[in-house]
Amino acid sequence: MFQSVNSVPAFDIKQQYVTIEAEVSAAVLEVLASGRYIGGPIIESFEQKFAAYHGVTNCIACNSGTDALYLALRALEIGAGDEVITTPFTFIATAEVISAVGAKPVFVDIDINTYNLDLRQIAAVVTPKTKAIIPVHLFGQSVDMTELMAIAQKHNLAVIEDCAQATGAVWDNRKVGSIGHIGCFSFYPTKNLGGCGDGGAITTNDSELAAKMRVIKEHGQRNRYYYEEVGVNSRLDAIQAAILQIKLRYLDNWNQKRQAIASYYQKFLSQISGIFVPEELPGGESVWNQFTIRVVSESRNGASASRRDWVKNQLQERGVSSMVYYPYPLHLQPVYKHLGYQPGQLPVVEQTCHEVLSLPMFPELTTQQQDQVIYALKDCLV
């Protein structure tokens, strides 16, 4: 058995902080000394830089990726009686915001090779009530946005890109978040561009939609104490903006390191039978928020998570931490029981949930640590 020397974490955000500690500390202290903790020039500066990075005209900072999606749906006036198509293989936030505005999430199965929406199945679920599609660029890999935008245009649907795990990812030489009608981002600490707390942002080239979202996120007021509609309180605080503004300068470099790590995994893990190793789609440039393999089930019918879980435990015994994103598909969760989905109705995602295993992935991961991950997998599978 391969003997590990040190443990390998699934992710380590402390190492990144050490490299920029002096810059972050100075920026935070400057905000504290300014007395401008909500709104102000730091927020405006970050919004401008984030918009420029994505090649769009508008960025609206908010307090989470969840709120970014919610504000997008509100601006598009999607609500009771409407339907929004999305994936069942994502964090609950993608679907819960659809429910939060009173609309109905409509789930479509996924492509087993990309973990993203199976675009071939979208047309079959479009109805007169369908108003939008929320594609999720899962684990840092872009959906085929060329095909998706063509589908959306054919059916007159809005496209809200969920870019929570894909800041900096590219499709056909364009950053995700700049292709659909609205892009939504999360700055949760483990994301490629992560803050030191919650945070989010919205990108769009539609100035009218941008203006609507700014009103909604400020309690429905355009002018102070004059309320145009029922809004929410969703503001990115100045300290987070100051930190994110620093990190944005390093983002491309960090993403390049993730890509190099993914290439190393692909080179050596492809030699191990019994697992599926993810690859990039032609036309896309993944930023690998996660490197997620599939521990292929021995039975294709009634797939069991037992083999994946066994491998996960074996890796842990060898000092390698891993994560499961996501063990249960959304269409079979108790919260969506009322929608009437049945086991077997979306078979690819149900199988995938039993097989996925995310290996250690963060920019500071060393080659020695990667070798430990690879050897540990070989030790328990070969």
Image (cartoon, rainbow, N blue to C red):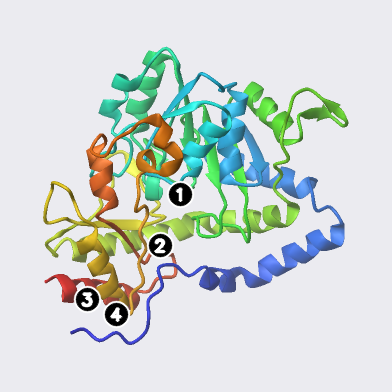
Which is in the foreground here, disc 4 or disc 2?
A: 4
- Which amino acid does the dot numbered 4 rest on? Glu
Q: Which residue is mark 2?
A: 257
Residue at (57% x, 33% y) in the render: 100
Mark 2 crowd level (few <14, some 14–19, many ≥20, 10 Å Cα):
some
Q: What residue is shown with label 3?
A: 375
Q: Nearer the viewer, mark 4 or mark 1?
A: 4
Distance, label 3 to label 4, CA atoms, is: 13 Å
Residue at numbered disc 1: 165
Kind of residue at badge 1: Gln
**Neighbourhood count class around disc 4 (C-alpha, 10 Å): few under 14, some 14–19, many 20 upward:** some
Secondary structure found at label 2: helix
Query: The residue under label 3 is which amino acid type?
Result: Tyr
Counting residues from the start of the chain, the first of labels 4 and 2 encountered is: 2
Disc 4 target residue: 317
Separation of residues labelled 3 and 1 (CA atoms): 28 Å
User: Residue 191 in the image: x percent, y percent?
Assistant: 50, 55
Q: Residue visible at 37% across and 74% down? A: 366
